[in-house]
């Protein structure tokens, strides 16, 4: 009997839900009024705006561009990035009266170097807050720490050089995020975490504060001294970006073993020293790695990539890496799209496993010491290659006994063969439509063939 009653109530209830859903996204009048007030308050360049300019009384406000409502008609998402907003925004702005707001994106605007308004702390339903490159500067208000449902926070800024950056000093990062336990993504690029007086305030965040954090991006943060050790405890990170941060005191082995789940690791310009340890080979989930512009030395472990078969993007350029690469070095990297090894001191033959990477689009080996002879024909097995840069090695490149027509249909757009001991114009170029061609510093003599100009050639160097 009781269960029958319950069933009846359930049916009634789901019927109610069904009715409620049929009113889905019906704009509530007070929400529409609030949206129009907000539009009035914001100062924006109407020739850059694509959303705000189109907000008006005609039509359903939940369908206005950049606006989303929940089933009961409350605005839950405002995507106002790239809207040419250039005025400030006060604590009493209508923005802070959208009590049910879950997602707010104000990225890429120009809020005139204003502080982030404290009013933001009243939007306690926020799960996604994106204030990146919005022209805010100065200390991030304490009120951000009230947003306990935040899953994603992006307060990246730029112009650190002109002191127009976001600061996370008082309160420091630990105070701001320690209660934001749901946080998965934290982007603090360009943030100032330096207090000259209290040197320990440098962004102490631990996995006990943020158990679910998987993305941490701190590109070009202003830090006084090295990163706090606590960051090494965020073992479940899958995306870690620390470019332009001083990691000269960091052990790469510790870094690679502390973050076993990394899919993206970018450490460009971090003053990394020493050689790449074999523990790198255990990051089997890695898809994107950038360790360019460091002072890495030594040769690469011979089976470095053996188990890193998910790699799509590898950039080790502009270091002092040396040694020869075994011919099997790139075997199995069937997803690799970009490979940048330029500006190092690698020598020996170009490993032939390179010619069996079906997905390869860009290969840059310039400014190394690769030597020996090299048959350009090898690259015929890479039909989708768009950029091939072999300049300034000690190679003697042979264009070979090519059957020109078999080069037809290739997608090569950029070919750099400066200083490659070429003695004639490689005539397979006829069949390509290059944008960039560098044949400088070779032994080529005679007239420039007319076919060299192609239809879209932009850069030509024959000197
Ligand atoms: C609005 O943007 C356009 C295009 O960038 C620019 O030419 C114009 O000067 C801007 N107007 C104002 C008032 O900033
Ligand atoms: C009002 O908004 C609609 C759709 O958002 C747009 O097509 C129309 O041009 C707008 N009208 C005015 C006067 O801005
Ligand atoms: C913030 O918004 C900008 C512009 O839409 C976007 O490029 C960026 O990826 C966003 N950040 C996050 C964490 O989603
Ligand atoms: C960083 O913040 C501190 C404390 O607010 C301030 O003294 C310092 O000038 C800021 N540095 C930069 C580069 O903005
Ligand atoms: C974090 O939450 C605790 C308990 O709710 C509270 O005592 C503390 O003041 C909060 N800290 C911040 C920075 O919000
Ligand atoms: C972390 O994420 C898991 C799975 O999504 C969730 O169940 C858990 O509640 C989250 N933990 C915290 C502290 O938010
Ligand atoms: C960092 O946070 C942890 C955990 O709250 C704490 O034990 C440690 O003392 C803090 N370290 C610094 C330098 O503040
Ligand atoms: C690759 O994985 C296999 C199987 O897990 C393992 O035996 C081998 O040692 C790994 N190789 C490297 C270089 O890590
Ligand atoms: C080349 O690109 C085409 C189109 O993007 C794709 O279908 C094809 O599978 C690619 N070939 C190889 C060998 O990856
Ligand atoms: C390539 O350079 C290495 C190191 O300088 C040298 O040992 C080797 O003989 C050279 N190989 C060729 C084919 O010139
Ligand atoms: C350069 O090419 C010429 C023939 O075109 C060859 O005789 C010479 O050995 C090559 N030089 C080097 C360093 O391989
Ligand atoms: C050149 O290659 C094409 C396509 O692979 C083939 O049909 C043709 O017979 C070849 N010509 C010569 C002279 O080998």
Image (cartoon, helix red, strand yellow):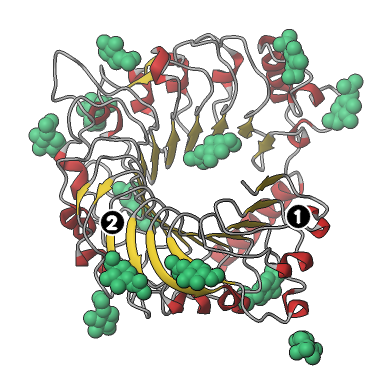
Q: Is residue 6 left or right of residue 37?
A: left
Residue 324 appears in the picture as rendered: no
Residue 68, position in %: x, y?
A: 67, 37
* Secondary element at tag 2: loop
Q: Does 179 appear above or below 355?
A: above
Q: CA distance from mark 1 to mark 2?
A: 38 Å
Residues at marks 1 and 2 touching, judged by CB atoms closer than 8 Å: no
Residue 447, position in %: x, y?
A: 76, 56
Residue 236 appears in the picture as rendered: yes
Residue 352, position in %: x, y?
A: 45, 78
Q: Does 459 appear above or below 227?
A: below
Q: Does 371 appear above or below 404?
A: above
Q: Does 451 appear above or below 267?
A: below
Which residue is pictured at 49% across the width and 33% down the height? 129
Which residue is labeled 2 in the image? 321
Q: Is residue 178 left or right of residue 404?
A: left
Which residue is labeled 1 in the image? 448
Q: Is residue 144 left or right of residue 250?
A: right
Residue 376, position in %: x, y?
A: 57, 73
Front-most of residues 241 and 37:
241
How many badges with numbers are in the image? 2
- Residue 353's quadrant in the figure? bottom left
């Amino acid at each position: 009997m009781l269960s029958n009653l319950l069933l009846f109530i359930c049916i009634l209830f789901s019927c109610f839900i069904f009715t409620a859903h049929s009113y889905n996204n019906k704009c509530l009048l007070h929400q529409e009024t609030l949206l129009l007030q907000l539009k009035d308050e914001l100062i924006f360049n109407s020739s850059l705006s694509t959303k705000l300019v189109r907000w008006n009384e005609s039509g359903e406000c939940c369908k206005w561009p950049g606006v989303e409502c929940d089933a009961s008609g409350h605005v839950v998402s405002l995507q106002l990035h790239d809207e040419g907003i250039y005025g400030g925004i006060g604590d009493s702005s209508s923005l802070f009266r959208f009590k049910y707001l879950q997602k707010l994106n104000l990225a890429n605007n120009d809020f005139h170097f204003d502080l982030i308004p404290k009013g933001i702390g009243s939007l306690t339903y926020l799960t996604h807050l994106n204030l990146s490159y919005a022209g805010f500067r100065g200390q991030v208000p304490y009120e951000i720490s009230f947003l306990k449902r935040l899953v994603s926070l992006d307060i990246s800024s730029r112009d650190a050089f002109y002191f127009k950056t976001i600061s996370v000093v008082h309160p420091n990062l630990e105070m701001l995020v320690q209660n934001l336990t749901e946080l998965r993504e934290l982007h603090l690029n360009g943030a100032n975490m330096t207090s000259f007086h209290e040197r320990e305030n440098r962004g102490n965040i631990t996995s006990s504060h943020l158990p679910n954090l998987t993305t941490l991006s701190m590109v070009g943060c202003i830090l006084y001294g090295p990163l706090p050790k606590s960051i090494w405890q965020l073992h479940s990170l899958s995306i870690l970006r620390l470019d332009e941060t001083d990691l000269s005191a960091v052990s790469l082995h510790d870094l690679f073993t502390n973050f076993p789940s990394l899919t993206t690791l970018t450490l460009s310009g971090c003053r990394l020293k020493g050689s790449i340890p074999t523990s790198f080979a255990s990051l089997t989930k890695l898809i994107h790695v950038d360790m360019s512009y460091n002072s890495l030395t030594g040769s690469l472990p011979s089976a470095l990539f053996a188990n890193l078969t998910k790699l799509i993007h590898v950039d080790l350029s502009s270091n002092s890496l040396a040694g020869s690469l075994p011919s099997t070095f790139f075997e199995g990297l069937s997803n690799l799209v970009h490979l940048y090894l330029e500006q190092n001191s690698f020598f020996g033959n170009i490993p032939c496993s390179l010619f069996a990477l079906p997905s390869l689009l860009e290969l840059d080996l310039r400014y190394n010491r690769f030597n020996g002879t090299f048959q350009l024909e090898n690259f015929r097995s890479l039909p989708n290659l768009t950029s091939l840069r072999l300049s300034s090695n000690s190679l003697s490149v042979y264009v070979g006994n090519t059957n020109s027509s078999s080069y037809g249909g290739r997608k090569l757009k950029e070919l750099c063969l400066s200083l490659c001991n070429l003695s004639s114009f490689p005539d397979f170029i006829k069949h390509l439509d290059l944008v960039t061609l560098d044949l400088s510093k070779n032994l080529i003599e005679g007239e420039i063939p007319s076919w060299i100009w192609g239809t879209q050639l932009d850069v030509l160097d024959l000197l």
